[in-house]
Amino acid sequence: MHKITVAIDGYSGCGKSTTARLVADALQYTYLDTGAMYRAVTHYFLENHVDWNDADAVAAALPRIRVSFGERRADGGRDTLLNGANVEDAIRSMAVSSKVSEVSAVPAVRRFLVAQQQQIGQAKGVVAEGRDMGTHVFPEAELKVFVTADMDVRAERRQAELQAKGQDVSLQEIRDNLTHRDRIDTSRDDTPLRQADDAEVLDTTHLTIPQQVAWVVERARTRM
Ligand code: C5P
């Protein structure tokens, strides 16, 4: 069986990350969480007061940023490291969530991270998850999945995730954040979120996580 690339894109809070991580586990592939990379850069900009609308400031800051991933955790995930420090919890905060789409719309930031993503994906055997995996970063991916779900379900799932981490955020605030990110992600000039022509749609509204994982793994196996 030859190793393939699985590209998973879609809206925020549709269960993409959990599904991608478990698919990677099932196939014994590398899981690439590109959203975590954009979140880590956003965290760096916020902490270091870098104005992402200032091209010179961004150009000066990017070479000082190294995003990497820690050892595999028991749940199959990996902590996100920023210049070696574990920022996994910080990058999931609402402070980062509310700004990450603005930062992700900056072309220099995208170029910086896309180059690293393509390098990681070079060896194949990767499940890459984000917004532009199938359309831009891995256009040759053997399997492309576009994930959607109803807004109410997305907001409830995201709230439960945050609650599990001890963060109490109202459904309204989460819904507003998801809507805000959808709007920026789909309307930015540089590689906006859209379904690749050859992507298959996975609507997770009425699916459990194991069902979502099985759906992707089944399709991946037919392409190996
Ligand atoms: O996947 P996650 O919700 O953690 O991603 C956070 C944000 O990072 C997205 O809302 C989007 O603005 C940005 N992103 C992106 N391109 C990717 C992955 C994430 O623009 N490939």
Image (tube, helix red, strand yellow):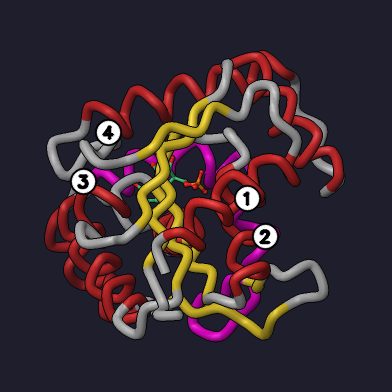
* Contact between labelled residues 1 and 2, with CB atoms less than 8 Å apart: yes
Q: Amino acid at mark 2?
A: Leu
Q: Amino acid at mark 4?
A: Arg
Front tag of 3 and 4: 4
Residue shown at 45% from the left, 80% from the top = 1
Look at 64% across and 20% down and name the residue there.
173
Q: Residue at x 75, y 30 (%)?
A: 159
Q: Mark 3 or mark 1: which comes first in sequence?
A: 1
Q: Which residues are magenta?
A: 80-105
Provide the residue designation for mark 1: 19
Q: Earlier in the sequence, mark 2 or mark 3?
A: 2
Q: Identify the residue under disc 2.
A: 22
Q: CA distance from mark 2 to mark 3?
A: 36 Å
Query: Which amino acid type is shown beneath numbered disc 3?
Result: Asn
**Marks 1 and 4, the one that precedes in the sequence:** 1
Identify the secondary structure beneath mark 2. helix
Q: Earlier in the sequence, mark 3 or mark 4?
A: 3
User: Height in image: 166 above or below 171?
Assistant: below
Q: CA distance from mark 4 to mark 2?
A: 23 Å
